[in-house]
Amino acid sequence: MRTKVVIIGGGPSGLLLSKLLSLEGIDNIVLEKQSREYVIGRVRAGVLENGTIEMLRLAGVSDRLEKEGFQHNGIFLSFRNHGFRIDLKGLTDKNVTVYGQTEITKDLYDSIEKENGIIINNAKDVLPHEINSKNPFVTFKKDGLEKKITCDFIAGCDGYYGISRSIIPKEVINTYERVYPFGWLGILSETPPVSEELIYANHGNGFALASMRNKNLSRYYIQTKLEDNIDNWSDIKFWEELKKRLPSNVADTIITGPSIEKSIAPLRSFVCEPMSWKKLYLVGDAAHIVPPTGAKGLNLAVSDVYYLYNAMKNFYLLDTTDDLKMYSTRALSRVWKSIRFSWWMTTTFHKFPEQSSFDQRIQDSELEYLENSIASQTVLSENYVGLPF
């Protein structure tokens, strides 16, 4: 087989890149190691920046999002049993939209398949070859048979544990990482959300987050020990702990119910540089990870797609490699700003294992200053709604 771009990874970033390239007449093939059902079934966050929505509009997959998504004009922050609101819309003239990543993936799959795009699911042992040549290629196994696709470029959209990043020589790549000493225990419940906007809570027992998927589906998180086990957390125990960490006036109104999904996720900050080598370009979690505190993971992947899509479009339509050469530099500039913001949100709201009473008072003072400073709220808001591409 021969195509112009092979995209490794059929998550939202790989599918979005595929759809955008196809709209420009740039042939591409998506290779995904899992089944379509598995990919669509993964539960992920869904707080979308304006820039992400614009990219989905450009791809022609925003109709359902705009009908079913929930626009949030603010967020609530709490500490010492007290909460206050950040007016995102008033401070930036922008908002965020809650629409599940699962739904985005469904929309992209449906659109690509409708337009006869090529997504090869259950592609095993995917491996890029001869990246430093005029004719790189990718091999994989499908139904027990080895296959080969020759191409011009390879986009690695295969996540943190994917094969793409490992292809870059060790002497070329630099990695930066901070692993946080706690995790997030999250549950999904078929209950009305306690608030129409997200609530971020700093508490002596640890962080808590109240969020939502729709009017009858809520997503809640509490900070736990990294080595904690999901079996230690019954639904009753979870609800009791969540209520302790949220302000009393909020906790008193929570409608509880059985969880339909429960998991513990580790938190880390990770960046690799560069995000490209020869004919290989990394996108999303293949190149960087942010803790979910700042709601940046999917949005950062979409901004990567923005830079790479435009660079490839300019290569094929304008015969210039300038933007391809600048892809890593441009993407990393935005990545590091989001890494910083997510780190700030994480260190401000979480309790660290060795945290002292002094450290807690510093967090309290940080949030008290934020509550009373429009300038500080504006900085937070600009980052939360998303920096420009």
Image: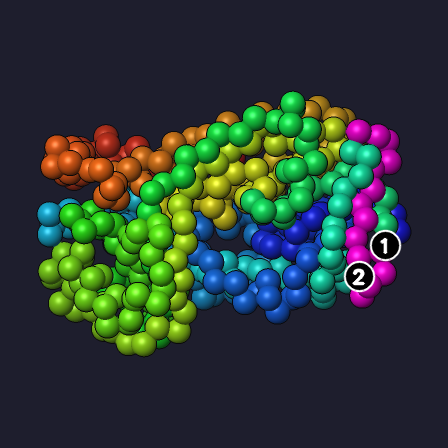
Q: Is mark 2 on a helix, strand or loop?
A: strand
Above or below, 70 against 353 in this view is below
Residue at 23% x, 68% y: name it.
237
Image side of residue 241 versus residue 300, left or right: left
Which mark identifies residue 355? none
Which mark identifies residue 142? 2
Which mark identifies residue 147? 1
Within 10 Å of disc 2 (Cα), the crowding (few <14, some 14-19, many 20+) is: some
Q: Are marks 2 and 1 in contact (CB under 8 Å)?
A: yes
Q: What element carries label 1?
A: strand
Residue at 74% x, 28% y: name it.
278
Residue at 80% x, 61% y: name it.
142
Above or below, 199 against 102 in this view is above
Above or below, 348 against 10 in this view is above
Residue at 41% x, 69% y: name it.
261
Magenta segment boundaries in residue numbering: 132-147
The magenta stretch spans residue 140: yes
Query: Can residue 283 be seen from the camera position used here?
Result: yes
Q: Which amino acid does label 1 sit on?
A: Lys
Image quadrant of residue 138?
Answer: top right
Q: What residue type is labelled 2?
A: Lys
- Give coordinates of residue 289: x percent, y percent: 48, 41
